[in-house]
């Protein structure tokens, strides 16, 4: 509590009367993620600005992921989150071998993302996420149930269902700490947020996810990408840790 009430130092952020220091630490979370192949042309239409382009892993195909996360111990609180992200590159960056390079970078965690929707169910993390990183956070209703053999997440917004996602839980692998990054816009200017992530109890499988889309306009946006359809892969992280740095102007 003392750290929250002290005077902010340069580089700190004052959010709802609380001081947030960098890096922002995630000490314990679990996540369920599904990834799909989608039309790169349709996905490109969802990106703001011209600085980013969809990273194609096959001709005319990019990747979209939907992740449901329960942050159990985090500098920004205890909350649920849904992340809808596209895998991208900054225009002009090295691409390597066509398609194979992007696929290899994705598997190694080197392919950046751009988050197009990031609903949470707490107001503090919503305000912090927008102010610090330019993340498109909103406060919505998110029910994330991990009590059975499958993780089940329901996201509702403006009184309408957006999506329901379920996928298998469980795994025995470890995900060693890796350096990752995501792009966002702050006041219309492109920024990059570097972060570190690791996990225990990791399970990865082909397919395995079940997605239902509701009546909300965001669900229609996902339909424009060809969803729902069988997922390329699904991933469960039983104990996830992370460390987020401040956003850097590109």
Image (spheres, rainbow, N blue to C red):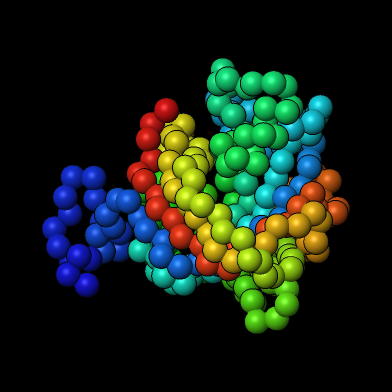
Q: Splitting the image into 4 quarters, where does residue 40 fall? A: top right
**Residue 114 place in picture, x, y as percent:** 57, 40
Residue 96 coordinates in the image, percent (x, y): 64, 21
Q: Is residue 223 visible?
A: no
Viewer-side residue, 240 vs 201: 201
Corner quadrant of residue 24: bottom left
Query: In the drawing, does residue 12 fall left or right of residue 119?
Result: left
- When the figure is inspected, residue 189 is found, relative to residue 65, above or below; the finding is above
| Residue 182 pos. (x, y %) | 51, 41
Q: Looking at the image, is 140 positioned above or below residue 59?
A: below
169 or 70: nearer the viewer: 169
Image side of residue 67 versus residue 207, left or right: left
The residue depicted at 38 percent of the width and 40 percent of the height is: 247
Residue 110's quadrant in the figure? top right
Residue at point 42%, 28% (across, down):
250
Residue found at x 62% / y 34%: 105
> Looking at the image, which residue is at 22% across and 72% down?
1
Taking the image as shown, residue 68 lies to the left or right of residue 1, namely right
């Amino acid at each position: 509590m003392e750290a929250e009430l002290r005077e902010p130092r340069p580089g700190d952020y004052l959010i709802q009367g609380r001081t947030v220091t960098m890096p922002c630490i995630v000490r314990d979370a679990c996540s369920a993620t599904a990834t799909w192949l989608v039309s790169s042309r349709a996905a490109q239409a969802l990106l703001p600005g011209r600085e980013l382009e969809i990273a194609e892993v096959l001709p005319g195909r990019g990747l979209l992921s939907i992740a449901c996360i329960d942050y159990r111990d985090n500098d920004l609180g205890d909350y649920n989150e849904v992340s809808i992200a596209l895998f991208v590159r900054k225009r002009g960056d090295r691409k390597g071998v066509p398609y194979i390079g992007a696929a290899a970078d994705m598997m190694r965690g080197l392919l950046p993302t751009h988050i197009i929707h990031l609903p949470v169910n707490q107001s503090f993390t919503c305000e912090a996420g927008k102010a610090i990183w330019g993340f498109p956070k909103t406060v919505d209703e998110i029910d994330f149930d991990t009590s059975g053999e499958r993780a089940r997440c329901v996201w509702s917004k403006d009184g309408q269902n957006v999506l329901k996602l379920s996928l298998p839980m469980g795994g025995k692998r470890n995900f060693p700490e890796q350096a990752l990054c995501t792009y966002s816009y702050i006041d219309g200017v492109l920024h990059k947020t570097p972060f570190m992530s690791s996990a225990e109890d990791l399970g990865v499988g082909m397919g395995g996810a079940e997605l239902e889309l509701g009546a909300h306009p965001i669900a229609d946006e996902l339909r424009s990408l060809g969803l729902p359809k069988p997922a390329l892969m699904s991933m469960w992280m039983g104990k996830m840790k992370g460390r987020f740095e401040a956003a850097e102007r590109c």
